[in-house]
Image: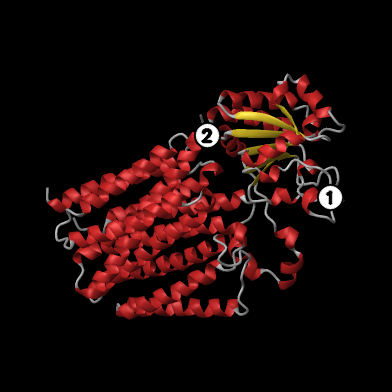
Amino acid sequence: MTETTLGLFTIFVLSVFVGFEVISKVSSTLHTPLMSGANAIHGVILIGSMVILGTAHGGMQITLGFVAVVLATVNAVGGFVVTDRMLQMFKGRRK
Amino acid sequence: MSRADTVELVYLLCAVSFIVALKGLSTPRHARAGNLVGAAGMTVAVAVTFATPGLHRALLIVGAIALGSAIGLPAARSVKMTAIPQMVAAFNGVGGAAAALVSLAEFDRSSTETGLGTAAAVLLSALIGAVSFTGSAVTFAKLQELMTGRPVVLPAQRLINLLLGASTVGLVVWGLAARSVLAAVLLTIVALVLGVLFVLPVGGADVPVVISLLNSFTGLAVAATGAVLRTPLLLVAGTLVGASGTLLTRMMSQAMGRPLSNILFGAITAQPTTVVTGDSDDRSVRTGTVDDVAVLLAYARQVVIVPGYGLAVAQAQHTIRELADLLEHRGVEVVYGIHPVAGRMPGHMNVLLAEANVPYEQLREMDEVNPQLPLTDVVLVVGANDVVNPAARDLPGSPIYGMPILNVDEAHAVVFLKRSMRPGFAGIDNALLYDPKTTMLFGDAKDTLNALVAAVPTA
């Protein structure tokens, strides 16, 4: 399934609206966990990094891909774990 | 259905899981579940990527993921809660770097046959990803106190910015016209410098807003990379983060009572004289909404209420008891910290509260409550000011220096219910009002408390 440029642009525009809509009302207490959770989600660049490393030609591209996979994993794994730790404390307070 | 189609279909599910995750993260009740849904979506996405047709070096990929996990996991597990902002900045920075690297590698592979739109996406991703990387690095250094938290402005900052801006435009045009990989690499280098200069002028207290902004930058860089690779999942997830991050950044700067432009460029545009003398005017006050404070209170472990004369004036002692009862009902431990001069005469406040049937055992004298304050989640200061002013303890020149105070500045968060920013009885400015952990709720104490009583049950 290859995406046309127009198709990609359509997805982009719709996603902007979803992104705005989805967090339209949020308490300031949750600002930091939300930021951290969103931070983990852009760790999805890991998928792109994997594709680059898995289809690379030559040492240069392999090196770039490898570094990208490592960095993206740090982003995704660290992001989700640290957000969970934050929210865990939140829940403990509720009793 | 081909294998590629199956992969795409699973990616769609993962994109949906990210939307659900963000939605969950924005309500206290579902925040943790939301985060787990996001993590599950990410895991599935990674797993299914191995099934992509034509993907080689599976072992090397697994090794790289293992290495990344070995770095990220202990870091996330061991970080102290006080150091969370710089940890988020670090994770954000490496994500931005990964986006830039992926785009550059893809450009290197297919530069000559790259379409104009894709080339633009490559340059955009490299530019924003690199800015996000070094910008986050500087934020990290500021928060970790590896460098000064004060705004840093270079002598010829405007000229430098102009030159960097011009070279950015030039390199983008060159890269687009010639599909030149060299131009993209040079652009990345310029962007790395831009990222540093972008964050240096921001003061320490404003840094969380910048982290949020850089977070949305990385989202956009990932979205651009998604366009380069023609992977809708990356495009959707990156755009979601970019859009919601932009909105979040705006909400945060609004909560600090300052426009974003002032936070980012205040130090550059300020005249040198105001930097020296305008200290007090530049301080920002964080105003919260009733809903924010209701959530803060409802999910606290211990709340200390500090009532002052303003409470008595507003005849709000009954309402505050209602609020305290609601919180106790939710399992929050509530006590009242009574300053010796709360009200207008010693013991005045105890009388007022007893009149409202506040249980005696909830009333604590100053000397009893002060040792508890460092362990307190939220202090709710209602109509008091001077009795919690740290100047009495810290500023030898202050007229109230030496007055015993409730050390509410030692609590995790402070909420002031006040009519205005006017100084209190003694007419002395209270630095605590400008503290980053302080939230202001302006208005009549009774009206505000009634609103809180209405908001807490739904928090």
Identify the residue at image location x=66%, y=37%.
B372
Viewer-proximal residue among B219 and A30: A30
Identify the residue at image location x=48%, y=79%.
B166
Q: Are marks 2 and 1 on the same chain?
A: no
Identify the residue at image location x=55%, y=79%.
B160
Q: CA distance from mark 2 to mark 1?
A: 36 Å
Q: Is residue B116 visible?
A: no
**Which residue is the site of mark 1?**
B401
Quarter residue B440 falls in = top right
The disc at residue B329 is none
Q: Secondary structure at mark 2?
A: loop
**Residue type, numbered disc 1:** Tyr
Tell me, yes or no, whether the two marked residues, 2 and 1, touch with CB atoms within 8 Å. no
Disc 2 crowd, CA 10 A, few/some/many (<14, 14-19, 20+): some
Residue B74 drawn above or below residue B170: above
Viewer-proximal residue among B6 and B66: B66
Image quadrant for the N terminus of chain A? Answer: bottom left
**Which residue is the site of mark 2?**
A93
Residue B268 drawn above or below residue B301: below
Disc 1 crowd, CA 10 A, few/some/many (<14, 14-19, 20+): some
Host chain of mark 2:
A
Residue B430 picture location, percent across and down:
76, 49
- Report how many numbered discs are placed on residues in the image: 2
**Residue type, numbered disc 2:** Arg
Residue B253 picture location, percent across and down:
58, 53
Residue B335 drawn above or below residue B433: above
Residue B201 picture location, percent across and down:
59, 68
Identify the residue at image location x=70%, y=41%.
B416
